[in-house]
Amino acid sequence: MNEKWAELESKYFFPVGKRLPVTLVRGEGSRVWDEEGREYLDCVAGIAAVSLGHCHPLVVKAIQEQAPSLMQVSNYYYSVPQIKLAQLLCEHTGLDKVFFCNSGGEAVEGCIKVARKWGKEKRDGAYEIIVAEKAFHGRTLATVTATANERYRAPFTPLVEGFVRVPFNDVEAIKRATTAKTVAVLLEVIQGEGGVNIPDDDYFPQVRAWCDEAGILLMVDEVQTGMGRTGALFAHQLYGIEVDVMAVAKGLGGGFPIGAFLAKDHCAALALGEHGTTFGGNPLATTVGYTVLKYMIDNDLPAQVAKKGEHVERRLRSLADRHPMVTEVRGKGLLWAMELDREVGEEAVRLCLEEALLANNVKPTALRLMPPLTITEEELDRVVEIVDRVLGRIEAGQPK
Ligand SMILES: Cc1ncc(COP(=O)(O)O)c(C=O)c1O
């Protein structure tokens, strides 16, 4: 059956993505099924989006109840679900103003616009944004410019002006790059697509202090790390700091598309007519977003994630002890990568699939695991057993 879909895919689609030979048709919790009825444990979770697990009953119910009433009205009118979600998000982020959109890329794009507008108003037209090596911020023209990967950027030159790149986890580099033209620093708290790169504990407090000293904004892209993924509702909270601007998406929708950017009052610079969206914040998406966020808060899901994170960390580290090809285990909460001493990421993902596990080769040399936040410790143990077998198979079959 996959051959038929592959043929149609190559006929009708831009060939921008590489698909694995499996067609998924159903999901429940941390498991998905293909069209032949084969079950898989899912440690990709729609790229860290399916936060409450596939088809969580509350998410399904929210959609079923909202869809027959109202799905889309435009932002010409008030919408109750949107207001409820805005209030809940602001209360739990320490930020004051929100704008809803449909994806992570749009959310980061919005942050960039906030910074530019604020720079015009408050910093003599400063517009440069300091971004990090290995960063990923999206595929729109501005966010792809902010993204580090040359392969994603090169085909689309000329790119958007005004981004300066520095090494991640190096506050002195940010200081050196700051000029009169600088308006903001934009960082992922943990770099997801760059390979699950964790900063030193004092990096964000130092960046915060520098932004305050220099009078520039600290903007975080929590599209991947937000919504409980790292064991705090938002990853920057792990480092005890507040931020000026933040992008969220992915986990906020529990599988349904929604994004948002938020800002503190002092820099919420967008005024009437300066930004807009047709679908962003529609009643269906915000009903789902509200349901997901409320569930996370009411059940203290971030604390559960932190506990499961400690469990899986122990298991992954013991795996690393037994497999010399694992050179590093990095992560927090339920976002993990295993660095391998050779370029077998693709092979590892293929073997995981054979062993009924969805995993991701975030780099040619790294395997990433980002299951639904509702995954059980028993399921995590099964994940680790599968990875154990896969690493064993690679070691047996492919000498370094
Ligand atoms: C940190 C980060 N920012 C932005 C994005 C872009 O989000 P989207 O694909 O929803 O546009 C991603 C997607 O993986 C991401 O990980």
Image (cartoon, helix red, strand yellow):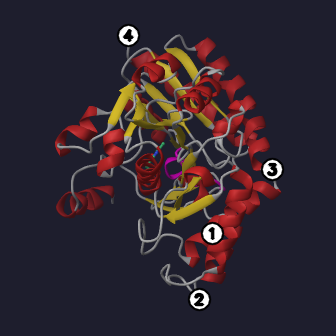
Q: Nearer the viewer, residue 258 or 314?
A: 258
At a point 55% along the width and 55% down the height, the residue shown is 268
Q: Do labels 1 and 3 touch, CB within 8 Å?
A: no
Q: Which disc, if any, is residue 68?
A: 2
Ligand 1 within 8 Å of the CB at mark 2: no
Residue placed under numbered mark 1 in the picture: 288
Residue 125 % position (x, y): 37, 45
Position of 111 relative to 214 (above/below): below
Assign a secondary structure to mark 4: loop
Of the image marks 4 and 1, the number of the one nearer the N terminus: 1
Q: Is residue 47 magenta?
A: yes
State which quarter of the image contains the N terminus: bottom left
Q: Which disc, if any, is residue 400?
A: 4
What residue range appears in magenta?
44-52
**How much space separates mark 2 and mark 4, taking CA atoms?**
58 Å
At a point 64% along the width and 43% down the height, the residue shown is 229
Q: Residues within 10 Å of mark 4 (few under 14, many from 20)?
A: few
